[in-house]
Each structure stands twice: as C-alpha cells, then as structure tokens.
C-alpha cells in the first residue's frame, strides 16, 4: 500500500504544480498571449488534428475499402468464369456419355463408306446443336485414332502426327490429368480424353472444344481504367482489359501468388495487384491505381485543407490585431487613471468607442472633471466643507476599488466572459455617474439603495464571501438623505469587519420610523467595534483606530449634521451582541 500512497501523493503534487503554473500564466500573461493561445487551442489545434487524421486514418481506410471492393468484384468475376467453365464441362460429360458417338468412333468402317457418312452427319448434327447453345462456343472436334474412320480435318482429326507430338498430348496421356484447359490467341481451348470402350489397337479419342475470347470479357463489367489479366498454369496469358506493358510486372510476382490476395503497399500513388484463382487453376489478376479512383476527392480535400489552414492563419491574425487594439485602449485608460491619481485632472486622452472600455473612459473623464470642480470651487469657498467633500470624493474614487474593478474587467475580457465584463463596466459607470453626478447633494433613499446595489454588484464580483440583504419598506424609499451615505458605511463594514478566509460576511440593511425621524440600520456580523471606540464616537463624534475604521463614518456623520442639524447623524450601537451596527438618523 505504501508505494501506492506515494504515487498518489506525487500525482497530487504534480497536479497542483500544473494548476499553479496555469494560474500564474493566466494572471501574468498579456491579453494578446492569452487570446492567441486560446485560438491555438480552440481552432488551430483541432484543424491540425483533423488534417493528420485525414492522412493517418481516413486515407488508409479509403484504400482498404477500395481494395476490399475490388477483391469482391474480382471474386465475382472468378465465380462467373467458373460457372461458364462448368457449362463446358457439362457439355463434355454429355458427349462422353453419347453411346452413338462411342459406337461411331470405334466401329470398323472398312468397306462401309455409306456408314461412315451417316456417322459423320450424326456428329455434325451433334456439333451444331451444342454450338447453338452459346454464341461464344465456336467449335467441337475429336482427335481420333481409328484408321478406318475417315478424317475430314474439321470435325474428325487424326490423333497421330502433330497432335500426338504436342505438349497437349503429353499432358493428357502421360501425366494422367485427363483434361487440359489453356488460353490461346482466339480464346480458350478445352481438351478432354473420351473414356470410350475401345479395342486394344485404338487409343482413347480426345475431345477439343474451342471457345471464343469474347467469353472471357463478356462476363466482366469493366471500367476503362481497370486492368484485368488471365494466366493459366502453362505460362499462357490473356489480356481482358489493360496494357501488355504490365504483363512483365505481373509475371515477376506469379510465383509468390497463393489462391487469393493482394501485392503492393496501400498508397494512393502506388499500383496494387489483386489476384484470385479459379477452380481449374487459372490466376485472375487485376491492377488498380487508387489515384484514378480518388483523384477528384483528393483534390477537393486538399483544397479544403488549404482553406482550413488559411482560415486558421486569418483567425490568428484577426485575434492578434484585436487583442493589440484592446490592450492599447486598456493601457490608455490605465494611464488616464494614473494622471488623475497624480493630480492632473485636465489630461485628455480620448478612447474611441462605446463599448465597456469606452464607457469607462467617459466615466473617468466625468470623474476627473468633477474632481477638478470640487477641488477648485468648493475648496476656495469653504475650507471645512472642502475637506469633508474631498474625503467623500476619496471614498467615491477609491483607487484600489477602481483598480480592482478594472482588473476584474480585464480578467473577464481575457476569459472572453463578455456578459460579466459588460455587467461590471455598467455597474462601475452607474456607480460613478451617481457618485459624481451634478445637482443636489440630497437624494432619495431609493437612489441611495440603487447606488449601493451598483457598488455591491462590483464588490460581490471581487469578493465571493459577502452576502447582503436589503430590507427597506416601500413607504420609506422617498426619505431624503445625503448622497453617498449608505455606500461608505457598507464599504467600511466590508473592509474592516475582518473574517476568516472562508467565512461569509453578512450585511443586513433595514429601515424604520422612530418618533419624528427615519432610522436606517446597517448591521454586520464581523469582529465588531470595541465598546470604548463606539462610546467615543457617540460622545465626541470622533474615533481613533489603527485600522482606519472611523474616517469614513466621521465624514458621513459630519455631512448629515451640517445639512440636517445636530439632532441627526450616525450612532454606533454600543451594546451590540456581535459584529457592528450603525444607525443613520435623518428627518422625515
């Protein structure tokens, strides 16, 4: 068991390292690299795999199917040829059993010339009847050894002489086969010994059937590109269809041919030899050129492959250009933010377009102009009010919040999650449009809730361990309060209500009426504010904390008191059981 545990541990570590490498690459690589890699993985790689599968899998499969189809075609031709030869074998058997012919061939015709003529007419009639069965059945003759039977040189031929001295005679009698089927210039020659009753002085007669070469090609449905050849065991051949130039090629392989099979490698540009053997020992050989079958298909496939490759290159180029333009615009937006951060509010770096980046740029321009107005106008008129308003502006344009949001937008763009990136940009634009909107600093509670939801839409994307519940009665939505009242308090809760890494921070917002005031409560279940700090704030309107908890609360409290009076503002619940509770009190 121990080696198995070590192996699992190694695989686990390897998997973790791979995930970490992918995560680092995802976070640190440029958008262009990520998009190009994605295109390579999603488009170029499948195209390459498809091309390789065509050459490594589809091509051999096509060739095997072609060879199998041609082998079946050749087998069918062999069966048909065997059937035809069985027909002539049947005719020869009928002739063997003809008693009249037996008697004719072995009778003594000395002094009986009329009887000779009768038997010759009988044989002519027999010959005519059989020849009429098949137009390719050309002739029947018998090589006879009876010296008293007249030989007409056509129907009855002498056995002695040139015939007995031929190789055919030796094969029939000396080798004892009894039959001899061979190819000739005119077609097929079929020889068979007629095992008739005979005297000791006579040899067996030999039947010779002549079959026209049309018999060999009429049973094959040939295409112009097909090449079929016949070879008998005696070295003779016949070209059914094709060129004599391939005879020598086939003859070099005859000795290695069995009953059936193929010779040659399965490639499109190589001739393949297919062969089969008849029941009477002939080799039927077919030569196929795969390129003639698949020339048009291969040409079409090659065209498609070229188009696929071109499409992959074009797609890569398009992504390269789009990613470059996208990166350039994001860099411009980042430079613009850096300029505003450094106090240069008049920097004008236009970013064209009305997509998420363009809208964020316009929002940033509005933001910079609002900042300039607030700094130049409000600061000059009222130093105290300027300080408060600048503090509020800092909360509104918290660089870390903006950077984190833009980074999240960039991350979703890299992931090609357009819906998420669009939602974040819309939330960011609406958030800053409300925060920096011109007009009165006093808004309805419904507007504050809408603004808060935009903020939460962004924060919940950035931090997954936040759950917020807003429970505001409809009759309180028209209550008026300072702009940017709820959001800084909720942001304070998110930033300073420290939780464990995997714990969820719950924020609950409620509202109600108490006497002549409207009270809005923001509660969280974080670590809470110590009693001494809460008491100090409620008593002196001041709070000191190394964590910076009180600055945003004091800013909101001061703005409410400046506008509505000292009877209103913020109160931190001192006896809250856990977490923090902040009450916002404004007049009805």
Image (spheres, rainbow, N blue to C red):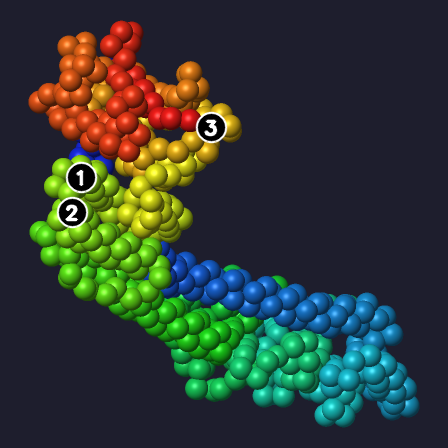
Q: Position of residue 387 (x, y in %)?
A: 14, 39
Residue lying at 24% horizontally and 47% vertically, measured from the top left: 406
Q: Is residue 537 visible?
A: yes
Characterize the local packing of mark 1: few (<14), some (14-19) or many (20 or more) Cα atoms within 10 angstroms. some
The label nearer to you, 1 versus 2, is 2
Q: Position of residue 293 (x, y in %)?
A: 51, 75
Q: Position of residue 147 (x, y in %)?
A: 73, 85
What secondary structure is marked by label 2? helix
What secondary structure is marked by label 1? helix
Characterize the local packing of mark 2: few (<14), some (14-19) or many (20 or more) Cα atoms within 10 angstroms. few
Characterize the local packing of mark 3: few (<14), some (14-19) or many (20 or more) Cα atoms within 10 angstroms. some
Instruction: Name the quadrant containing residue 581.
Output: top left
User: In this figure, which residue is indicated by the disc labeled 3?
Assistant: 476
Foreground of the two, 537 or 179: 537
The label nearer to you, 3 versus 1, is 1
**Whether label 1 touches label 2, CB < 8 Å:** yes
* Mark nearer the N terminus (3 vs 2): 2
Instruction: In the rendered view, tell whether residue 109 sits above or below residue 377.
Output: below
Q: Position of residue 169 (x, y in %)?
A: 59, 77
User: In this figure, which residue is indicated by the disc labeled 2?
Assistant: 381
Residue lying at 35% horizontally and 26% vertically, measured from the top left: 586
Instruction: In the rendered view, tell whether residue 349 sits above or below residue 463.
Output: below
Foreground of the two, 442 or 364: 442
* Mark nearer the N terminus (3 vs 1): 1
Q: Quadrant of the N terminus?
A: top left
Instruction: Name the quadrant containing residue 264.
Output: bottom left
Rounded to the nearest angstrom, the CA distance separating label 3 from label 2 is: 34 Å
Rounded to the nearest angstrom, the CA distance separating label 1 from label 2 is: 8 Å
User: In this figure, which residue is indicated by the disc labeled 1?
Assistant: 385
Residue lying at 14% horizontally and 21% vertically, measured from the top left: 542
Foreground of the two, 240 or 146: 240
């Amino acid at each position: 068991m121990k080696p198995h545990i070590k192996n699992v541990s190694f695989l686990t570590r390897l998997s973790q390292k791979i995930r970490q490498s992918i995560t680092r690459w995802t976070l640190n690589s440029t958008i262009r690299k990520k998009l190009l890699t994605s295109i390579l993985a999603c488009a170029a790689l499948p195209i390459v795999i498809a091309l390789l599968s065509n050459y490594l899998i589809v091509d051999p499969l096509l060739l095997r199917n072609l060879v199998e189809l041609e082998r079946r075609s050749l087998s069918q031709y062999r069966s048909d040829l065997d059937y035809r030869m069985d027909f002539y074998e049947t005719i020869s058997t009928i002739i063997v059993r003809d008693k009249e012919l037996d008697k004719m061939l072995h009778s003594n015709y000395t002094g009986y010339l009329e009887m000779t003529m009768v038997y010759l007419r009988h044989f002519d009639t027999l010959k005519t009847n059989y020849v009429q069965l098949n137009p390719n059945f050309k002739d029947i003759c018998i090589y006879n050894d009876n010296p008293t039977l007249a030989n007409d040189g056509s129907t009855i031929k002498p056995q002695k002489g040139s015939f007995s001295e031929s190789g055919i005679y030796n094969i029939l009698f000396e080798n004892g086969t009894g039959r001899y089927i061979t190819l000739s210039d005119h077609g097929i020659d079929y020889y068979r010994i007629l095992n008739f009753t005979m005297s000791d002085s006579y040899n067996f007669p030999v039947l010779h059937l002549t079959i026209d070469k049309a018999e060999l090609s009429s049973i094959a449905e040939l295409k112009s590109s097909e090449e079929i050849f016949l070879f008998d065991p005696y070295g003779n051949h016949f070209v059914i269809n094709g060129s004599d130039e391939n005879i020598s090629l086939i003859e070099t392989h005859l000795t290695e041919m069995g009953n059936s099979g193929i010779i040659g490698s399965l490639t499109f540009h190589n001739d393949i030899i297919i062969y089969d053997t008849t029941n009477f020992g002939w080799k039927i050989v077919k030569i196929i050129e795969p390129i003639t079958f698949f020339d048009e298909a291969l040409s079409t496939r090659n065209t498609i492959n070229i188009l696929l490759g071109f499409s992959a290159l074009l797609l890569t180029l398009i992504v390269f250009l789009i990613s470059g333009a996208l990166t350039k615009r994001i860099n411009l937006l980042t430079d613009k933010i850096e300029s505003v951060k450094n106090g240069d509010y008049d920097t004008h770096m236009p970013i064209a377009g009305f997509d998420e980046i363009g809208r964020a740029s316009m929002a940033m321009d509005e933001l910079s102009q609002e900042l300039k107005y607030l700094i130049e106008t409000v600061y000059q008129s009222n130093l105290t009010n300027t300080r408060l308003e600048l503090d509020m502006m800092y909360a509104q344009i918290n660089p870390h919040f903006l950077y984190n949001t833009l980074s999240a937008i960039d991350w979703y763009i890299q992931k090609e999650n357009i819906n998420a990136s669009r939602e974040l940009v819309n939330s960011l634009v609406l958030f800053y449009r409300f925060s920096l909107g011109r007009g009165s600093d006093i808004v309805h509670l419904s507007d504050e809730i809408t603004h808060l939801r935009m903020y939460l839409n962004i924060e919940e994307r950035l931090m997954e361990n936040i759950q917020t519940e807003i429970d505001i009665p409809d009759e309180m939505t028209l209550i008026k309060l300072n702009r940017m009242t709820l959001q800084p308090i909720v942001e304070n809760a998110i930033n300073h209500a420290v939780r464990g890494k995997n714990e969820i921070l719950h924020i609950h917002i409620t509202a109600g009426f108490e006497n002549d005031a409207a009270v809005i409560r923001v509660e969280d279940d974080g670590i809470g504010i110590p009693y001494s700090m809460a008491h100090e704030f409620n008593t002196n309107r001041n709070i000191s904390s190394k964590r910076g908890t009180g600055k945003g609360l004091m800013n909101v409290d001061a703005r409410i008191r400046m506008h509505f009076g000292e009877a209103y503002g913020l109160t931190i619940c001192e006896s809250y059981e856990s977490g923090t509770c902040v009450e916002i009190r404004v007049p009805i």
